[in-house]
Image (cartoon, coloured by chain):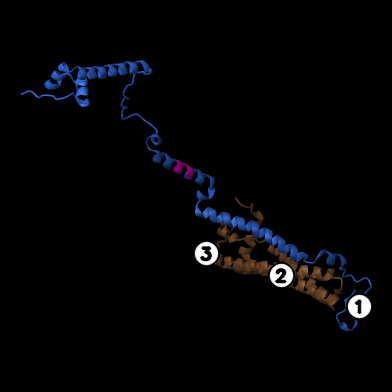
Amino acid sequence: MYKKALALLLLIAFLLLPSISEAKEIPPGRWWRIPYFSEPLQITDSQQNDLDALFDYNRNRLVELKKQLEQEKRDLTTMFEQEHLNETATLGQLKKLESTRTLLAATHFSYSLEVRKLLGHDRFQQLKTLYRDWQGKP
Amino acid sequence: MAKQITGHLNEEQIIESVIDKSGLDSAVRRHLLECSACRAEKEALENRLTRFGQFSREHAPSPRRWPRLLERRPASTIRPSWRIRPSFGMGMGLVLASFLALLLNPHLFKPKKDVALEKVYQEMLRDEQFMSEIEKLEENPLPRFYVDITDFSDQDGSDDLHESRSPGGQDEIIT
């Protein structure tokens, strides 16, 4: 039963992997504040503020989830290394860890999704092209 | 009628008779001619002064160069201002120190826009690092031991190994 649940979680994570790789095509940080990106994409002041709010919320949430995931990982290690192993509790902890991991991936992905919604198809494609051609800080 | 001196001359009159003979009162002059005691006292004072003069001339150091008055510099002469007023020199020092401080802190020369952009770049670097940590966790959050022992290609074909180990679905402590 646990293995089935685990397999399901891993499947969800696997399905999210392409989305995660999509996220890598978005520049890190507040790229909309850099003229190299903001000028050709014609990002308005209002959109910059929206992106700021989205970025702040998303990164704060990711920080929380990262902490949670690392704690759950420590808890699982502790359970596993106990002399008297509680198999059910350990597998339950593993499930919890996988759930948090899925949530982390989904939160990461949701950022890309919101950026894609805000920019629209054409500008999103343009952003990816700009990022690929970007030489970094001038 | 001429003034008469009774007794001897006092100390002041003796000194006066030595240093200002021409201005001497006639009564004093006459007394000095008549009184040998006062005359002796006057001569003794003269002798002491003469010896003192000789002694001073003999022991005074010979001047190496003659003293002279400082020349008045013309108004056009350029001299460093801090030599005139120490406060001006201190002020100059402060100005130089401030200039050096500005030179050593490049952010103070940059326009505000550049400073803001620099912050964005720095945040980008931090965010890139943070997101790579997130991606690592997304890929594999499990502890190493779990990765080593997990194998989903059940070799024995059993789909529910856990249930076979813990019949009744109760928590079981394995020692």
Which residue is found at the position 66% from the left and 70% from the top? A110
Q: Which residues are magenta?
A: B93-97
Judging by the rendered image, the residue that carries numbered circle 1 is B165
Could you tell me the amino acid type at mark 2?
Gln
Q: Secondary structure at mark 3?
A: helix
Judging by the rendered image, the residue that carries numbered circle 2 is A68
Q: Are marks 2 and 1 on the same chain?
A: no
Whether residue B43 sits left or right of residue A62 in the image: it is left
Whether residue B174 sits left or right of residue B68 in the image: it is right
- How far from the left and from the top, in percent, is residue A9? 78, 73
For the residues labelled 3 and 2, the Cα–Cα distance comes to 35 Å
The circle on residue A45 is: 3
- In this view, the residue farthest toward the right is B156
Residue B90 visible: yes
Foreground residue among B162 and A28? B162
Whether residue A8 sits left or right of residue B6 in the image: it is right
- How far from the left and from the top, in percent, is residue B15? 22, 23
